[in-house]
Image (cartoon, helix red, strand yellow):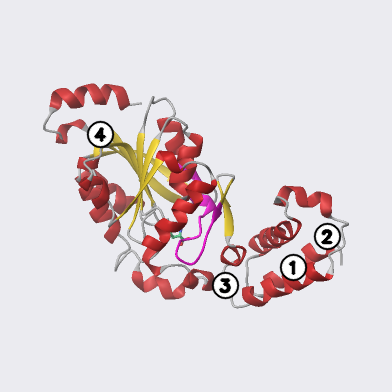
């Protein structure tokens, strides 16, 4: 069987497993590009290439595991985010393409600054923090996570991309490591767990292999936003941003939590599918005690 035939076959087999057709086609490409050690875009050049016995065997093994709806990214032990490759394992949430929308916005906001300090709270694989460090060469970053296993992967990923020197990885609950170090950021970004606990059982089978710690947002899905938003002001410079990924139905609730804590809602973010995916808040001046200091920062950081 050649690569092109195998691509069609794999795509069909994955669809039969219940994987959505577009995702099945994407996964088939990922499997074959892993076999040819090329990018999915380069697969085109391998169309007529026959797959030898070892390659067929490898596909068979991958599909045997995938039949249990074990995520392909964990099988291949890597995935792509913001055009960078990240190692992943079941200790970390698999980076989602939709999260790229938030990263792009953070890059846009921070690009004009000379030496921005950013934090990624609950960094998991490190995909957000590492992408920000990669695309913002003058930035310094702090990445926190409560899971030491997740932090170990994030650190490995930072080393892989030669960015470990500009990212401090700190273990702890939400903002605690940041507050403990008395750090104030220009922007804090987070993709916290936001799925209501009761909804977890009904999710796609693949999600059951991902860390519950990274998905379960408590009874109403908002538990982490409440704590994060309430504790964020002292970790932000005046005029600093809090950029949060949210579920499609959480725009209003998260915006309200932000407004109640002195944030101005700057923007609501939609993902590639047109679904609501995040909220950008800016910490406003009136909550601060030291107004002289904050006036100058405010001028500097308000776009
Ligand atoms: N975006 C994930 C999903 O697809 C959820 C991630 C999270 O809870 N932070 O369900």
Q: Earlier in the sequence, mark 4 or mark 3?
A: 3
Task: Give SS at disc 4.
Answer: strand
Q: Are the residues at dot 2 and dot 1 in contact (C-beta closer than 8 Å)?
A: no
How far apart are the alpha carbons under marks 3 and 2?
Answer: 24 Å
How far apart are the alpha carbons under marks 4 and 2?
Answer: 54 Å
User: What residue is shown at x 70% (from left), y 50% (from top)?
Assistant: 39
Relative to 243, say whether 70 is above or below: below
In which quadrant is the N terminus drawn?
A: bottom right
Residue at the left extreme, as displayed: 289
Where does ligand 1 appear, by image quarter?
bottom left
How far apart are the alpha carbons under marks 2 and 1?
Answer: 10 Å
Residue 226: quarter of image: bottom left
What residue is disc 2 on? 4
How far apart are the alpha carbons under marks 4 and 3?
Answer: 42 Å
Q: Are the residues at dot 3 and dot 2 in contact (C-beta closer than 8 Å)?
A: no
Which residue is more in the foreground, 175 or 202? 175
Relative to 243, say whether 76 is above or below: below
Left or right: 65 with respect to 170? Answer: right
**Mark in front: 4 vs 1:** 4
Task: Give the magenta part as a residue range.
Answer: 86-103
How far apart are the alpha carbons under marks 1 and 3?
Answer: 16 Å
Mark 3 surroundings: few (<14), some (14-19) or many (≥20) residues within 10 A: some
Q: Position of residue 34 (x, y in %)?
A: 70, 58
What residue is disc 3 on? 70
Task: Give SS at disc 1.
Answer: helix
What residue is disc 4 on? 237
Q: Which mark is residue 10?
A: 1
In which quadrant is the C terminus drawn?
A: top left
Q: Earlier in the sequence, mark 2 or mark 1?
A: 2
């Amino acid at each position: 069987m050649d690569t092109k035939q195998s691509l069609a076959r794999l795509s069909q087999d994955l669809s039969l497993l219940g994987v959505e057709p577009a995702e099945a086609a994407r996964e088939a490409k990922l499997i074959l590009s892993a076999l040819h050690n090329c990018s999915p875009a380069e697969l085109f050049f391998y169309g007529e290439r026959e797959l030898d016995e070892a390659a067929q065997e490898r596909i068979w093994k991958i599909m045997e595991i995938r039949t249990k709806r074990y995520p392909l990214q964990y099988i291949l032990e890597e995935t792509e985010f913001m055009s960078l490759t990240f190692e992943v394992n079941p200790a970390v949430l698999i980076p989602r393409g939709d999260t790229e929308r938030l990263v792009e916005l953070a890059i846009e906001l921070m690009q004009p600054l000379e030496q921005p300090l950013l934090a990624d709270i609950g960094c998991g694989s490190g995909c957000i923090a590492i992408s920000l460090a990669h695309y913002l060469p003058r930035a310094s970053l702090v990445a926190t996570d409560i899971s030491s296993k997740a932090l170990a992967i994030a650190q490995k990923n930072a080393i892989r991309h030669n960015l470990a020197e500009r990212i401090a990885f700190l273990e702890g609950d939400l903002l605690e490591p940041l507050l403990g170090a008395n750090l104030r950021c220009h922007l804090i970004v987070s993709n916290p767990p936001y799925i209501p606990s009761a909804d977890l059982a009904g999710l796609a089978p693949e999600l059951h292999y991902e860390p519950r710690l990274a998905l379960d947002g408590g009874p109403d899905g908002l538990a982490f936003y409440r704590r994060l938003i309430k504790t964020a002001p002292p970790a932000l410079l005046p005029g600093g941003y809090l950029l949060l990924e949210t579920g499609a139905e959480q725009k209003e609730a998260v915006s309200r939590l932000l407004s109640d804590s002195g944030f101005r809602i700057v923007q609501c973010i939609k993902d590639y599918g047109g679904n609501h995916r995040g909220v950008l808040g800016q910490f406003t001046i009136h909550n601060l005690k030291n107004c002289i200091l904050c006036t100058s920062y405010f001028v500097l950081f308000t776009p």
